[in-house]
Image: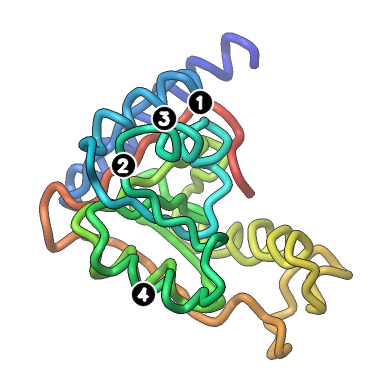
Amino acid sequence: MNEAMIKRNELLAQTVIKGLKSRNMSGYYANTKEEALKIALELIPEESTVTMGGTMSAREIGLVDALQKGNYTFIDRDNYEDKREAMLLAYQADVFLSSCNAMTQDGVLVNIDGNANRVSAIAQGPKKVVMIVGMNKICDDVDGAMKRARNVAAPINAQRFGLQTPCTKTGTCTDCKSPDTICCQFLITRYSKHADRIHVILVNDALGF
């Protein structure tokens, strides 16, 4: 990444962090994946019960690996035969890891979900939510964030899971009602009712989808 882009991301991140603060959420900026991992681990006390949605960003910075090797109770739904059981455990966890499909420059989070386990846990349940968000997901406004979530994140995730939706063939949202659709629930988080619950780590990198 060239110096101009790095500087731009640093400046934009400060705007986003101010927006998050105005919405009762906490924001942090990491210039590298290693810095992001350090911040995340500082936010997650040892012996915490930690779980997550299907976030790729947490894996990309090495956070999942660190939690699995560290002094934490990490609930990995991939190790559960009953996925619903693992999903329900998230609501009582100390920390829920996630990313977001898109967010605005003034700190609004936008997420789309199929099973709704991720968006419901962001909204309510876990004591703390820690989000790892690449600067590639920052959009001008809610309309732009929704378009990104539906036309970038959703088609890529549908392709990743091998689903039979129109967007896996066209690469863009057709507002389908396919049985395989993952655009079932939309969550716009414009304010956190509870202080010190939602923490967003912005990373100077292109993470996730």
The three-letter amino acid code for the residue at tag 4 is: Leu
Mark 1 or 3, which is nearer the eye? 1
**For residue 122, which quarter of the picture?**
bottom left
- Residue drawn at (64%, 58%) of the image: 153
Seen in the picture, residue 187 relative to 148 is either above or below; the reply is below
- Residue drawn at (44%, 32%) of the image: 66
Viewer-proximal residue, 42 or 164? 42
The three-letter amino acid code for the residue at tag 1 is: Asn
Q: Give the CA separation, mark 2 to mark 4.
A: 18 Å
Viewer-proximal residue, 135 or 164? 164
The three-letter amino acid code for the residue at tag 3 is: Leu
- Is 167 placed left or right of 204 in the picture? right
> What number is the disc on residue 72?
2
Number of residues whose C-alpha sits closer than 10 Å to that of mark 4, classed few (under 14), some (14–19) or many (20 or more): few
Lower position in the chain sequence, tag 4 or tag 3 = 3
Lower position in the chain sequence, tag 4 or tag 1 = 4
Q: Give the CA separation, mark 1 to mark 2.
A: 27 Å
Mark 2 or 4, which is nearer the eye? 2
Dot 1 falls on a residue whose secondary structure is: loop
- Residue drawn at (36%, 32%) of the image: 70
Lower position in the chain sequence, tag 1 or tag 3 = 3
Residue 197 in the image, given as x and y percentages of width and height: 19, 52
Asked if the residue at tag 1 contacts the one at tag 4, i.e. Cβ–Cβ closer than 8 Å, the answer is no
Q: Give the CA separation, mark 1 to mark 3.
A: 10 Å
Lower position in the chain sequence, tag 2 or tag 3 = 3
Q: Give the CA separation, mark 4 to mark 1.
A: 33 Å
Asked if the residue at tag 4 contacts the one at tag 2, i.e. Cβ–Cβ closer than 8 Å, the answer is no
Q: Which residue is mark 3?
A: 12
Dot 4 falls on a residue whose secondary structure is: helix
> What number is the disc on residue 204?
1
